[in-house]
Amino acid sequence: MANLKIQRTINYTLKISILILLILTPVYSGDPICIDGLFNDWDDVPVAYQDNHNDHVNADFSTLKITYDSDFLFIYIKFHDNEFLMQNWNEFHIYIDVDNDSSTGSFREGIGADLEWFFGDRSGKSYVDNQLNTVYQNDLKLRIAPTITSSEFEIAIARDSSPLTLNNQQTLVQGKIIFSEFGENTGDLLPDVAGGVSFFIGEDFIAGPEPITLERLNDSDLRVVSYNTLNEGILDSERQGHFKRIIQSIDPDIIALQEHSDWDEIHDIIQSWFPQEQWYASWTYRDLVILSRFEIIHDANIISSERTMAALLDTEDELGKNLLIFNSHLSCCDNDEGRQEQVDEFSSVWRTWVQNGDGPFELEHGTPFIHLGDFNYVGYKQQVETIKSGDIVDESQFGVDFLPDWDSTAIIDLFSRQTHKRMGYTWRKDGSSFNPGKLDYLFYSDASIDTGKHYILNTLAMDQNSLSEYSLQSDDTQEASDHLPLVFDMVINSGLGVRDGSALPSSIKVYPNYPNPFNPTTQIKYDLPKDSYVNIFIYDVMGKKIKSLFNNNQTSGYHSLRWDATNDIGESVSAGMYIYTIQADEYRATKKMVLLK
Ligand SMILES: [Ca+2]
Ligand SMILES: [Ca+2]
Ligand SMILES: [Ca+2]
Ligand SMILES: [Ca+2]
């Protein structure tokens, strides 16, 4: 009798437990994180742990977020204050219990860590079946952004990497994470109590990004590519075929090369790849050269180290103005002082040129300009700041700060991603201890230039169909150079220019929004042959209306509206696909657009 009672109680308890489990088992969902050094893609990811303030020695961990997509485990770490360099100058350790089993791996703060990664040392340890293996960034497919100092970082580790699958013995589904300031029991520990921060990986599939096609949005867009060709790669017979396919598929108007010191052979090669048109080449300054379909009016060295050059291109017919290109290859690696001096000097040269007209050649006020190249930015973020906003560090030698754009504002630091992957790195060397990073930059004067399409080409990330479409091979960018080409289209006339024929459109027409994909604004153009009641609404992919862009009577003619990626209450919306509809009387059109962040 007593036994039966116990049995019934057990059954009852079991039923209740299962019920509770069913109710409490959450559905885990990943997030489409782009490792690019921008963090708005983390906005919707819940905080996994908020660490105490002032429980540290040098570096005070604050916020931890954890998510995943189909390829990567993503970790976001933010500090309460100060800036740090993730791949150097620190003793930060992360411990990951990848099988959620405290009896396997190295026991630490209540978890069994099967992977320890020492960020500042760029090495780690993986424990599999009680065997210890030393691992490096490429074993994890470790990607971290930004590559410069920051108070927040986004980190990706491949879910199929050997340390996370315990040498293919498991699929990563659940684990625990600890961050430690010094890799020992001093300094800040995250979390503040033993046991780690748990994470779970659901069975949801996170689709890859909408591929960025290689073509221009409009034939009239001017395209520039910045490319460090690694030790005169284009002249290297072993690599020339890779470069030829890459450059031909990009089809640029302007090519800015770094690590290229031959002064004229390059011109013949580029010309032979594009025989239909005349190409022009600048003089080669140190290892910098600019090639262009437009005549080069002037070119010059800009700073004493010869690490920045300029070329003025005759784009009068295309832009109504000439175009100024700065091409830089700054000092490498741990030479932070050298890089800072180079950007300080650049800012002072530009200030003198703009303010006093005292430069290497005559320059018309308002000339559109971009500054691109291999900036080797792997240290202090101040060096980026100096180029962007003219904030000079050594003012005693280089003079006062100077906002570099024509409208006395900062210029724009372009954040691009790879065409087929949510990654923003432009440099990758799998045999190096350094994880891939953003070393190549493009800054542009937004007072004089609008962006069209822009991307980083990484053929390894492209599918076979896309490769075939552009006559590319999977290993092209990998074999050509340790840098990837950075492509930027300039939009000068955003479609509002001269129209021939009658003053009024003959039929109703809605054009594709432009640019698309876009960030952060896009333009929607449409023609009305007669006065109409017009409404333009924007919907998210779930079909929810998020913005009424226009809802009123409108006169016949050529119209355009801008959408700044905000909803009806003025909040910025998240990256992704959106749908816009235009209704004018009985006419209705629906089109898709993609917001990139
Ligand atoms: Ca990001
Ligand atoms: Ca802390
Ligand atoms: Ca374990
Ligand atoms: Ca702590």
Image (cartoon, rainbow, N blue to C red):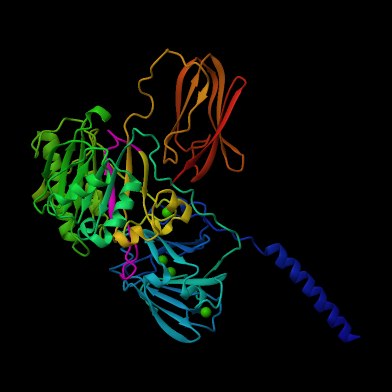
Q: Is residue 104 left or right of residue 117?
A: right
Q: In the rendered view, would you say 525 is above or below 300?
A: above
* Whole-percent x, y for residue 60 in the image: 37, 65
Query: In the figure, residue 274 lies in which quadrant?
Result: top left
Q: Is residue 48 magenta?
A: no
Q: Is residue 519 visible?
A: yes
Q: Is residue 414 visible?
A: no
Ligand 1 visible in quadrant? bottom left
* Whole-percent x, y for residue 81 in the image: 35, 59
Query: In the figure, residue 405 lies in which quadrant?
Result: top left
- Residue at left offset 62%, top offset 21%: 586
- Residue at left offset 64%, top offset 62%: 26
* Whole-percent x, y for residue 350 in the image: 15, 41
Q: In the rendered view, would you say 468 is above or below 184?
A: above
Q: Is residue 430 magenta?
A: yes
The total number of labels drawn is 0
Q: Which residues are magenta?
A: 428-451
Query: In the figure, residue 325 lies in which quadrant?
Result: top left
- Residue at left offset 53%, top offset 14%: 531
The quadrant the N terminus occupies is bottom right
Residue at the farthest right position: 1
Q: Is residue 373 left or right of residue 182?
A: left
Q: In the rendered view, would you say 390 is above or below 482?
A: above
- Residue at left offset 37%, top offset 61%: 475
| Helix, strand or loop: magenta stretch | loop
Q: Nearer the viewer, residue 255 or 305?
A: 255
* Whole-percent x, y for residue 289 in the image: 17, 48
